[in-house]
Image (spheres, rainbow, N blue to C red):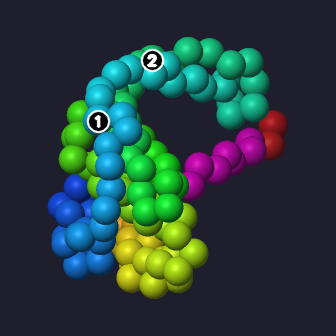
Amino acid sequence: MGVLARASAPELEALWRAHGAGAALAPLRPAETGLVMVRGRAGGTGQRFNLGEMTVTRCAVEGPGGVIGHGYVKGRDKRHAELAAAFDALLQDEARRPALLAAVIDPLAAAQAQRRATVAAKAATTKVEFFTLVRGE
């Protein structure tokens, strides 16, 4: 679900046309947008605090065999949530799962990892090493 949520809507749309179109899906909960509270921790491990609210869109569909697919994505893109839910439902079908993992999830995960590595490399070029000289008095 994380890979589907982090993928862009145009990426999912193209993959849907190639690998998911024609699947019999019934909407259970139409895409709707709301707010969720984002929580943080001081120092990553300390006391929890409310960081703020974030817009989230969710959707639920029923796929073949009665499986239910859910999609939660940040922002207001209803189509993105629908596509994430649709792929989630299709991935629960054991017959389709290996092909969908190879054709949809693995390429998306690789592209996301490459983007993260690019951003990390760019940020690493700005790293500053601090050191202290000790005066002997």
Name the residue nearer the viewer: 123 or 103.
103
Q: Does 104 sit above or below residue 88?
A: below
Report the amino acid beneath label 1. Ala
Name the residue nearer the viewer: 56 or 82.
82
Q: Which residue is mark 2?
A: 52
Locate residue 96, reporting x and y percent: 47, 78
Label 1 crowd bin: few (<14), some (14–19), many (20+), radius 10 Å: many
Q: Which residue lies at the image location 45% right of the left edge and 22% below the top edge?
A: 36
Which badge, 2 or 1, comes first in the chain's sequence? 1
Asked if residue 118 shows in the view, the reply is no
Magenta portion: prevailing SS class? loop
Q: Which residue lies at the image location 30% right of the left edge and 27% below the top edge?
A: 33
What is the residue that sits farthest to the right in this orientation? 137
Q: Which residue is mark 1?
A: 31
Left or right: 136, with 23 as reference point = right
Locate residue 84, reporting x and y percent: 37, 54
* Image quadrant where residue 136 sits: top right
Q: Which residue lies at the image location 27% right of the left edge and 63% below the top edge?
A: 12
Locate residue 54, reporting x and y percent: 38, 25
Locate residue 15, reporting x and y percent: 26, 72
Residue numbers of the magenta segment: 127-135
Report the amino acid beneath label 2. Gly
Q: Does 91 sit above or below residue 36?
A: below
Q: Secondary structure at mark 1?
A: strand
Q: Which residue lies at the image location 29% right of the left edge and 29% below the top edge?
A: 32
Mark seen at residue 94: none
Q: Does 25 sit above or below residue 111?
A: above
* Image quadrant where residue 115 sits: bottom left
